[in-house]
Image: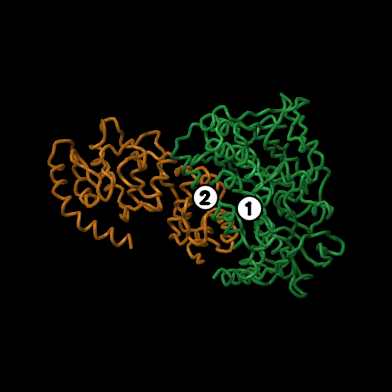
C-alpha cells in the first residue's frame, strides 16, 4: 500500500520539480552535459542545487564523500540507515553500483528506481551529480583506492543453477537469525528474492564490498555453488 | 509447504544416491527411533530438524520435564528490566503439533547404551536407534567452597533460566541503599562466555536508577574474559566507579562464600555482601556422565564432523555438554551443532545426503540501554576439533547509532532463533 502511494506522489511531484531543474541546468555551476537529461528521471524525487530541499528523496548536494543516510532531516529506509551505520560512504564507485541496481545494493531501499544498466549513462549522471559536491575537481572519476561495491561475476557464476536440497541444509544456518516468515525487525528479510539479486548480494558480502561483519563472515566461506544453492532455496521459500 | 518440499527432496535424494544400500538395517524395519534428551537450544532444534527433514520417516521423542522452556539467553535482559520474564518462555506445542514430535515430560534418569534405551525418572524406558544428549550444564561440586546447590536459595546461581533468575532479580531490587552486589564468576569453560559480564552490566543498569550508591564486586578466577575491552569501556562510561573486578592476581581465584552470614572471603579477607550471585565451575549435564560419554574434565568429546560421541557412534552430544573444540558454549552454538547432528542422523537412518558440516556462532550482549555489542566466528570441522575459521568483534569507540543497531539486531536474532528452535 505504501508503495502505491509512493508512485502517485512521484507522478505528482515531477511537475513541480521540473522548473527547478531547468534553472539548475541553466546555471553556470558546471558542465552537466549529457547527464542532465538523465537527471530529469531522478528529479521527480530528488532535488539538487542551491535551492534544493529534501523531497520524496533526500537532496543530493554534496553527495560525494557523504556517509550513506547522513542527512538529519530525512527519513531513510532501514536498509540505507543500516548501510550508513556500517560505514558506507558515497563515492563514485558506490554511487555507480547503487544507481545500477538499487535493490541489489540496499535490499530495502525505498528508492523506487529500477536501475540504470547502461554504464556510460551512469557515468554521465555521476558527472552531473559531481558538480554539486564540494570541490568537485578533487573528486576523481574513480578513486584508485576505492573499493568496488558490485562484485564482478563471470557469466558462468551468474548462471549457476543451485541445488535446493543443499540450499535447504545451508539455509538452516541463515535461519538462526533470518526468519522464514520474512519478519524483518532488526535483521532483514531474505526470502523470495530474485535469485540473481541474492547471488549478487552474497558475493558482494563475500568480496567484502558490503560492510556488515556477520554477513561478510557467513558469505566468506560459501562457494559459488553454495551461494547459488541458497539463492535457489530462498527464492521459493514459503512459510 | 515445508513438509511437501522436504518430502520431495528427501525422496529425490533417496532415489538418486542409491542410499538404500547404505542403511539397510534400519530402513527394513518400522520407523527408526530417535530420542532427544533436553529441550533447549540444542535438543529442541535437533528434534525439530530431524522431524522436519524426514517428514515423518523418523519417530522423534523429546525428553524434557518442562512444559514451558525459559531461555538462558536474554535472561540477563530480564534482570536489567528490558524484557519481562514471560517473553523468555517457549512451549513445545508446535514441535508436537506441527512436526509430530512426542514430548515425554520427564527427566532422563539413565542410558543403557548396549540395550540402546533411555530410562525416565518414572521408570519408563524408551528404545532408540540414535540418541541425542543435549542436557546443557551442571555445576561442579565444591568448586566454590561454602556453596552447593542447597544454598542456591540464598546465593543464587541464576545460570539456568527459571526461578533462580527471578530470585536474583528480586534480591537486586531489595538491596539496601549503598549495598554490595557480589558475583563469583566461573572458571573456563562455561556456558555463555560474555554472560556474567552482561549480567553485571544489567545489574548496574538497575542499580544506577534505583540505588546509585550501591557497588558491584566481581570475584573472578580468570585473568581475562570475553569482550573485556568493550565491557570495561562501557562500564566506565555508563556506570563510573560502580564496578570493581578482582582477578586472580588479587585472590579472585581463592574465594569462599558463607551463605549463613552473607559474607565472602577473598584469599582470607572477609567482606559482607548483600547479594551474592555464585556462578560455579561447570560440567556437562549429569545424564551425559550417566551415559558414560564424558571425559575426565566432565564434558563429552564428539566427532567434529557429525557431533557423534567419540565413545559411541549411536549417541550424539550437542550444545554446552559437548567438548568439540573452539566453539563457545552458547545457545547459538547449540542450535548450529544441532543442525549438523540432525543432518547426520537423518542420513544414517533414512539415507538422505550428509553435507560437510558448517558451524557458526554470534553472541550479542547489552551494556546499557541501546548499547549492544557482539562477537562471532565461523567454524569448520577438522578431524581433531571444530576449528575457528574467521571471527569478528565489535570495536571500542563505536558510535551510538551502530550500538543501537547492534542491540536491535540482537532482538531480531532472538525472534529468529527461538522460531528456529521451537517452530
Asked if the residue at tag 1 contacts the one at tag 2, i.e. Cβ–Cβ closer than 8 Å, the answer is no
In the rendered image, is residue B204 in sight?
Answer: yes
Q: Residue at x 79, y 46 (%)?
A: B150
- Where does the image place residue A105, in percent across and percent down from the top left? 40, 49
Residue A89 is labelled as: none
Left or right position of A141 against B5: left
Query: Badge 2, how many Cα within 10 Å: few under 14, some, many 20+?
Result: some
Tell me the colour chain B is drawn in.
green
Give A156 or B216, whichever is nearer the viewer: B216
Q: Residue furthest front?
A: B176
Q: Chain of mark 2?
A: B
- Chain letter for the part of the structure drawn in orange: A
- Where does the image place residue B112, in percent across and percent down from the top left? 86, 61
Q: Residue at x 16, y 50 (%)?
A: A18
**Mark 2 — residue?**
B411
- Where does the image place residue A86, in percent across and percent down from the top left? 44, 41
Query: Badge 1, how many Cα within 10 Å: few under 14, some, many 20+?
Result: many
Tell me: residue B188, above or below residue B25.
above
Left or right position of A62 against B175: left
Q: CA distance from mark 2 to mark 1?
A: 14 Å
Residue B71 is labelled as: 1
Image quadrant occupied by the N terminus of chain A:
bottom left
Q: Secondary structure at mark 2?
A: helix
The mark nearer the N terminus, 2 or 1, is 1
Give A176 or B91, whichever is nearer the viewer: B91
Quarter where residue B35 is shown: bottom right
- Where does the image place residue A109, in percent across and percent down from the top left? 36, 52
Q: Residue at x 51, y 66 (%)?
A: A239
Amino acid at each position: 500500500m505504501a508503495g502505491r502511494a509512493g508512485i502517485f506522489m512521484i507522478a505528482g511531484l515531477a511537475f513541480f520539480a521540473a522548473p527547478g531543474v531547468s534553472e539548475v541546468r541553466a546555471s553556470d555551476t558546471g558542465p552537466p552535459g549529457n547527464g542532465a537529461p538523465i537527471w530529469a528521471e531522478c528529479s521527480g524525487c530528488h532535488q539538487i542545487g542551491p535551492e534544493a530541499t529534501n523531497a520524496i528523496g533526500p537532496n543530493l548536494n554534496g553527495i560525494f564523500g557523504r556517509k550513506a543516510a547522513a542527512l538529519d532531516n530525512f527519513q531513510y529506509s532501514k536498509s540505507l540507515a543500516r548501510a550508513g551505520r556500517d560505514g558506507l560512504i558515497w563515492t563514485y564507485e558506490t554511487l555507480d553500483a547503487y544507481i545500477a541496481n538499487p535493490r541489489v545494493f540496499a535490499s530495502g531501499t525505498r528508492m523506487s528506481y529500477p536501475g540504470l544498466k547502461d554504464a556510460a549513462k551512469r557515468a554521465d549522471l555521476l558527472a552531473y551529480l559531481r558538480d554539486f559536491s564540494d570541490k568537485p575537481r578533487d573528486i576523481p572519476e574513480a578513486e584508485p583506492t576505492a573499493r568496488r561495491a558490485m562484485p564482478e561475476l563471470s557469466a558462468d557464476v551468474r548462471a549457476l543453477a543451485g541445488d535446493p536440497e543443499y540450499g535447504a541444509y545451508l539455509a538452516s544456518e541463515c535461519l538462526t537469525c533470518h526468519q522464514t516468515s520474512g519478519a524483518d525487525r532488526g535483521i532483514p528479510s531474505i526470502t523470495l528474492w530474485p535469485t540473481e539479486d541474492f547471488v549478487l548480494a552474497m558475493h558482494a558480502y563475500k568480496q567484502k564490498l558490503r560492510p556488515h561483519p556477520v554477513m561478510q563472515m557467513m558469505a566468506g566461506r560459501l562457494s559459488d555453488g553454495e551461494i547459488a544453492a541458497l539463492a535457489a532455496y530462498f527464492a521459493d521459500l514459503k512459510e | 509447504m515445508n513438509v511437501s518440499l522436504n518430502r520431495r527432496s528427501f525422496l529425490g535424494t533417496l532415489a538418486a544416491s542409491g542410499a538404500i544400500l547404505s542403511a539397510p538395517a534400519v530402513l527394513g524395519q518400522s520407523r527408526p527411533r530417535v530420542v532427544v534428551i533436553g529441550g533447549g537450544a540444542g535438543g529442541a532444534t535437533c528434534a525439530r530438524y530431524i522431524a522436519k527433514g524426514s517428514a515423518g520417516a523418523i519417530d522423534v521423542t523429546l525428553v524434557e520435564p518442562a512444559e514451558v522452556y525459559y531461555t538462558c539467553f536474554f535472561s540477563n535482559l530480564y534482570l536489567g528490566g528490558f524484557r519481562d520474564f514471560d517473553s523468555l518462555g517457549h512451549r513445545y506445542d508446535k514441535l508436537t503439533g506441527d512436526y509430530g514430535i512426542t514430548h515425554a515430560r520427564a527427566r532422563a534418569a539413565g542410558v543403557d547404551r548396549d540395550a540402546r534405551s533411555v530410562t525416565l525418572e518414572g521408570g519408563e524406558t524408551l528404545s532408540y536407534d540414535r540418541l541425542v544428549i543435549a542436557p546443557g550444564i551442571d555445576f561442579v561440586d565444591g568448586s566454590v567452597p561454602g556453596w552447593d546447590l542447597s544454598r542456591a536459595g540464598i546465593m543464587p546461581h541464576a545460570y539456568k533460566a527459571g526461578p533462580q533468575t527471578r530470585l536474583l532479580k528480586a534480591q537486586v531490587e531489595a538491596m539496601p541503599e549503598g549495598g554490595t552486589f557480589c558475583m563469583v564468576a566461573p572458571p573456563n569453560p562455561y556456558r555463555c562466555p560474555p554472560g556474567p559480564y552482561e549480567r553485571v552490566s544489567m545489574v548496574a543498569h538497575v542499580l544506577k536508577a534505583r540505588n546509585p550508591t550501591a557497588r558491584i564486586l566481581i570475584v573472578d578466577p580468570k585473568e581475562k574474559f570475553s569482550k573485556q575491552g568493550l565491557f570495561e569501556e562501557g562500564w566506565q562510561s555508563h556506570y563510573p566507579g560502580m564496578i570493581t573486578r578482582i582477578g586472580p592476581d588479587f585472590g579472585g581465584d581463592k574465594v569462599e562464600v558463607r551463605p549463613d552470614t552473607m559474607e565472602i572471603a577473598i584469599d582470607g579477607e572477609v567482606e559482607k555482601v548483600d547479594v551474592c550471585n555464585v556462578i560455579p565451575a561447570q560440567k556437562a549435564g549429569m545424564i551425559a556422565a550417566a551415559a558414560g560419554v564424558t571425559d575426565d574434565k566432565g564434558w563429552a568429546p564428539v566427532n567434529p564432523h557429525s557431533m557423534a560421541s567419540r565413545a559411541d557412534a549411536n549417541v550424539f552430544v550437542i550444545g554446552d555438554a559437548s567438548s568439540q573444540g573452539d566453539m563457545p558454549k552458547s545457545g547459538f552454538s547449540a542450535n548450529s551443532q544441532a543442525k549438523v547432528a540432525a543432518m547426520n542422523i537423518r542420513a544414517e537412518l533414512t539415507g538422505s545426503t550428509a553435507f560437510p558440516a558448517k558451524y557458526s556462532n554470534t553472541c550479542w550482549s547489552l551494556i546499557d540501554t541501546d548499547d549492544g555489542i557482539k562477537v562471532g566466528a565461523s567454524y569448520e570441522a577438522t578431524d581433531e576439533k571444530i576449528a575457528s575459521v574467521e571471527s569478528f568483534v565489535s570495536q571500542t569507540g563505536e558510535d551510538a547509532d551502530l550500538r543501537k543497531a547492534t542491540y536491535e539486531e540482537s532482538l531480531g536474532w532472538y525472534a529468529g532463533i527461538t522460531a528456529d528452535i521451537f517452530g
